[in-house]
Amino acid sequence: MTNSHSNVLMAKHARLDAQIQNEQHRAAPDTILVAMLKKQKLKIKETLARLG
């Protein structure tokens, strides 16, 4: 894939990380939402690893 695709994935990964951090610091975090966000983040990380 192209470098711009990698950049888009890295930006999305960073956005997901920020969402996870925000949710975890709430008084009553939504653990299901956090789990879903972490799965999405992992998929992106795996895709980036395959891209090299």
Image (cartoon, grey):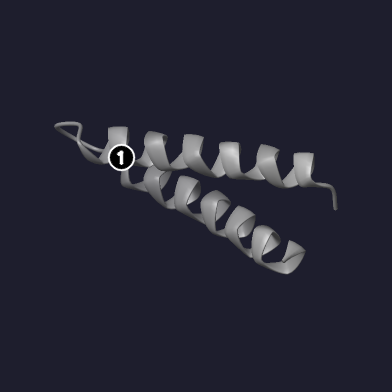
Left or right for 39, reference 52: left
Left or right for 24, reference 42: left
Question: Residue drawn at (62%, 58%), measured in percent from left and top?
Answer: 43
Left or right for 21, reference 39: left
Q: Quadrant of residue 21?
A: top left
Q: Position of residue 16 (x, y in %)?
A: 48, 39
Dot 1 surroundings within 10 Å: few (below 14), some, or many (20 or more)?
Answer: few
Q: Position of residue 48 (x, y in %)?
A: 67, 58
Kind of residue indicated by mark 1: Gln
Quarter in which the C terminus is drawn: bottom right
Number of numbered labels in the structure image = 1
Question: Residue drawn at (49%, 48%), measured in percent from left and top?
Answer: 36
Q: Position of residue 34 (x, y in %)?
A: 38, 46
In this view, the residue farthest toward the left is 27
Nearer to the camera, 35 or 47: 47
Nearer to the camera, 36 or 16: 16
In this view, the residue farthest toward the right is 1
Nearer to the camera, 28 or 52: 52
Question: Residue drawn at (85%, 53%), measured in percent from left and top?
Answer: 1
Q: Which residue is mark 1?
A: 21
Q: Position of residue 2 (x, y in %)?
A: 84, 47
In the image, residue 1 above or below residue 28: below
Nearer to the camera, 22 or 11: 11
Left or right for 39, reference 3: left
In this view, the residue farthest toward the front is 3
